[in-house]
Structures are given as structure tokens and as C-alpha cells.
Image (tube, rainbow, N blue to C red):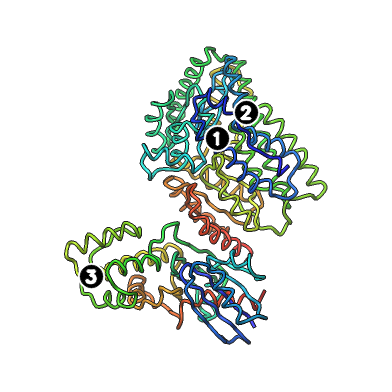
Amino acid sequence: MQVGIDLGSRTIKTVALKGGAVLQRRVVESGFEPHRQALQLLGDHPRARVVATGYGRHLMQQHADLDIITEIKAHALGARHLFPHCRTVLDVGGQDSKVIQLSENGRIVSFQMNDKCAAGTGRFLEMMALSLGYDLKQFGLAAAEAQASTAINSMCAVFAESEVVSLKNRGVPPGEIARSVHLAVASRLAAMVQKTCESHHLVFTGGVANNKTLVAMLEKALGVPILVPEDPSIVGALGAALHAGCS
Amino acid sequence: MNDAFQVHSDPELWEELGMDVARFSGMPPMLTNAYKNIFLSQHNRPEKMSYFDDMVANIHTGRIREIYDAKKGGKPVIGTFCVYVPEELVVAAGGICIGLCGGAQGSIADAEKILPRNICPMVKSAFGFKVGKICPYFQVVDLVYGETTCDAKKKTWELLDRYVPTHVMEIPQMKRERDKWLWLDEVKDFKAAVERITDTVADFDAVADGIKTINAKRFALQRLNALRHHNPSPISGRDMLLIEQIAFYDEPVRFAQKVHELCDELEQRIGNGVSVAPTSTPRVMVSGTPMALPNWKLHFIIESAGAIVVNEESCIGTRYYKDLIDESSADLEQQLERLTERYMKIDCSCFTPNDDRIAQVLKEYEASGAEGIIDYCLQFCHTYNIEAVKLREACEARGIPFMSIETDYAPDDVGQLQTRVEAFLEQIRG
């Protein structure tokens, strides 16, 4: 058995593979001591070959005998497994966003990752939803239903929050602000994709790909269809599990 | 060695130099820990690194005492911030030239009490060292000579002049014939300013000596860099970076001699097949903005991720030592012209156009046997940041793995940088 574990900034994901088929997948909150959570999850598979990825991979390696790979490689492997023609991976997680360009045979040719700020990431969307009084699901729906939008200029999470406050105080309806935030993130992600590569067979992974409104906006901005896995948040863990099979 | 190593303290000397002693006394233990962790934890270092370890141990004491004594004995001290300021002429006039660029996060808060936050960390760090009175080098200089290579620097000099006499040399930003003449005039002004402080006139023989001394220092670094390119590497990237940094505050004749002694050892190591990393280790070249002491952030991340840094295309790196001055001049005028010609070959991104630099990066990539380039850009350094676009294009056209990063001295993005560097190594390994 092969297990991939992805210790992300917000959640920990595991995927267990046997004979190439997904046997089990789990997603839990990272909590305050992510490695304890992770070790507990791994307790289910005592004899498996394990590969860790994500922010907590080094921490995990201090506590367990396992190999590590970066999120970039993990998402590339996972996306390619689900969509064998995939040439571009967009991964937007809790704390960063990445664009990975793959060669025809699946090698990583180049990648881009946001700098130290959390602009255009899951955490950013979460903060914006919170300041508008929505949960994540309502946030996306409200954005889809709104008819109008305003430009959000700031992509810094801190500044954007004050921008949202000033929009609220100008009487702009929350749905409209939600739409504006989505559009701003979509346009930033589109620019990041376009800067890195031609977006053919683009696979969108990470928890943020669950946001259908954002996916639709991004498709419109890029002018290409976007492939979203059934469960986009576990693609990194899947990639790690696949790597466990070949290491 | 590891346990015995300590960055020394000398509160009396610091007091005499007008430093904020209470605050500065925390610095040596911090640096001791960082140095043990980053440098002394390495395996199989060359023995001759011990001289450079000593230079770090004495960075706030022995070397300062040496400079201070020389100053009291009539050798004025001139501080600079850029490889464009001709140190040959300081040596010729009987002065001491030291680099004052700041590479520490600790002084940035001091600077931000006055300067805007959104400017280059190197400028802020250096300015903060002076304002906070927490750099013995800054305290010991008689004057500093700034230049106009970037906006943050040239406007900061106006403010720095309130704390220490600050002269400014205009560096043209194009390389046409008329720019060369402007530059020559600036070099002559610089010479005169230095001579006013040292109360001498540097004649032909003195300038010839200055050129010879600094040429010898640069040549020693060229030799070291060429040896370091050997695969497997006889010396780590971070040790090389450290030596390149020490070049800016050590006594030049002794420094060159010590570098040659290290080179002799590296030649032996190469002959005996001794290295610091196996041939399978991914070889990374770093290009871009300078790394002033004690900025070891990127090298430490790269080498901790299992790669080795094999070249620095940087002001603290080849940009400082790749060119020498022709020593066969017949008179003083010719000496100054040849000096200016040498300085015009420096390919800082403040110049436009600057395609020579792209060619230079590619040349060093080949020479160093690197397998990928990480372009290092200090936050808010617009010229290097924009030039990275052309560098990326040139690398992609040749199939050279390339990654550009923008960062400052704060530790908050280390996790993200580790991920990017590790992914870059995964890309190189394929």
C-alpha cells in the first residue's frame, strides 16, 4: 500500500492507494500540532510506504520515517494521473497559489508561486467572506448571483479588507462586493497563468477549485475550459501517494 | 572549533567609537549562533577557512581595532556602498576603503523610523546601522562615498549626510562615449575628495600601487572562483559567499594572500579527489542583487535543500572581481582612463541597455558547470527585477532551468522559499 499525506496550511489530506486504486481519502483540519494529527491519520496504515508533501513535510520527516516531495511536484503528479493530457496545473491552496507548466511527457518545465503575501489564495477568500458575513459556500453563490461589480484594486489581504470596509460603507450590497472579490482573484490568477505558459489542458487543483463561481470566471478570463478534479483538495496527497509507488 | 568559536566583544572600543553599546552587545552572541549553525556545521570544510572564521570572530573587534589604530596613525577611512566606487584611488591616497552595505534585518526598524518602508532592505539596513549607532564600521569612517546607482540610494544619501559626511559620485546610466567622459570627471573628483581627507596627492606611482593592490585582490578571487567551479566542488557555496563578503572589509594585501593559501589547498583537494559534495549534487548558480554581510539566507536555503551554489553573478561575487585594470599606463591621465574603462565594464542593471549582463550570466553559467540559475532580487530593486524578464527569456531559449525570487532579510518567507527552491531542484533532477 502507498499513502500520500499533504500537510497544508489549513487542512491535512491523506490518500491511500492499493494496486493503483484509491482505497481511502481523508481531509482534517491542520490544528495546532499538525504532525500529531498527521501521525494519527497515518496510524490507519502501519505498513504503507508514505510520502509527505505540503508545508508540514519537513516537520513530518522529523517524526516519521518517510520521503518528502514539494507540493509542486505532488500536484503535478496528481493532476497528470487524473488528466493524462494535462500540461498546466493551477493549484490554489490556503496560503499560496502556484502555476506549474508540464512538458508533453509530464516533466515540470517551469513553475511560478506567489511571493510572501497571501494575495489571491484561499486564505484571502476566506477573510473576505468573513468580513462580509458569509460562509465559503454562500460567498461563492452570492458572487454568482450578483449582477454588478466594482473593481477591487488591492490584492493585499490587509488592504483589501479595508477596501471592502469602505465599499460596505458606501452602501454597496454584499453580493456585489463578493462578486468583485471573486473577479479580482480570477483576474490575478489568470495573469499568473498567462505569465507562465500557454494554458492548454489546464487542471485546477487545491481547495479553492471547489469554488464554482471562481472557476467559471477564470474560464472566461482565460478563454479556455478548465478541468477540475472531483475532489480538487486531495490532488497533492494523491501525487505524494503516487510518488510512494515509484520511489 | 565549533564549540570554541565566538564572535568577540570589546565594549570599551565600541564606547570609544560612540556606539550604542548596550544595544550592540546582543549582536555578537546572535552572530555566533548563526555562524555556528550555518558555517561550522558543515562537514569537510577546507582547513584554510580558519582565517575567514577568524575574520568573522573579529568582525566587531580585532579588525575594527586594526582600522582604528591605522586611522589614528594617519590613514583615513572611507566607506562605500557600491562596486562602482574606485577603491584603487583610496588605497593610492593612503586611505582605507571599506564596504558598508547592510545585510541584517536587525537595523531595519531603526531606518524605518525615518525612511519609507517600501524601499530596498540593503539601503534601509545600512542607514539603520548608522542611525542606531550599531555598526562599528560606520562609526569608524571619516566619510562615506555614495553613488547614484538607484533611487533609494541617491535620496538616502541626502539624509545620511546629517549623520556622517556623505559625498556622492554620479554614475551615468548609459555607456556612450559622452558617459565615459562624465564618469572620468567623476573619478577625478573622487580622487580629489579622497586626497583632501588623506592630505596627500596620489601621484603616478601611488596610483600604480593602488591599482596593483586591488588587481591582486580581484585576481585572487578569480582564481578561487575558477577552482570552486570544479565538480565535485572543493568548497561550499556559502563559504565562497563569505569570502566574497569579507573582501569588502579586510586589508587587501593580507586578504589576497589568504585567498591564495586557500586556493593552494583547494588545488590539493581537487588533486586528491576531496570535495564537500558528491558529483551528483545539483549545481545552482545565483545571479542578481548583492548579499551584504550577514545575509546568507538564500545560500543556506539552497544548500540545506541538498544542492550546492557554484557561482555568484552578483556585486558581492563576479561583478566585483571579473575585470582587472590594465597596469601598463604611461602617465596618470592614462591610469585614470584605464581605471574608468575597467569600471565601465561592470554590468549593473542600472544601465540601459544592459545586454552585456545577459551574456555574462550565460558565460558564467557555462564556466561554473551549473545546472540551473536562481535569480535573486532584493525587494524593491526594480532594475534587477525587470531585467529578470530578459534573463528568463534568454535561459528559456537555451533550456536552462531558471527561477527568479524576490525577497528581503526577514525570515517570514523562508518556508515558501524552501518550497520553491526544493521544487526547482526537483525540476533540475527531472
Tell me, yes or no, whether dots 3 and 2 are on the same chain: no
Query: On the image, numbered disc 1 is attached to which residue?
Result: B25
- Distance in Å between CA atoms under marks 3 and 2: 63 Å
Query: On the image, numbered disc 3 is attached to which residue?
Result: A174
Determine which quarter of the picture holds residue B208.
top right
Q: Is residue B108 above or below residue A13?
A: above
**Mark in front: 1 vs 2:** 1
Q: Secondary structure at mark 3?
A: helix
Q: Which residue: 56% across, 71% down?
A: A36
Q: Horizontally, is A186 left or right of B126 in the view?
A: left
Chain of the residue on which disc 3 is drawn: A
Find residue A19 and report its horizontal and vertical position in percent.
63, 87
Counting every numbered tag in the picture gives: 3
Residue B335 tag number: none
Q: Of the residues shown, which amino acid type is indicated by label 3?
A: Pro
- The crowding category of the residue bearing disc 3, from other C-alpha atoms within 10 Å (few below 14, some 14 to 19, many at least 20), is many
Residue B63 tag number: 2
Q: Which residue: 68% across, 35% down?
A: B54
Q: Is residue B263 above or below residue B211?
A: below
Task: Check contact, mark 1 vs mark 2: CB within 8 A.
Answer: no
**Mark in front: 3 vs 1:** 1
Q: Secondary structure at mark 1?
A: loop
Q: Which residue: 56% across, 17% down?
A: B332
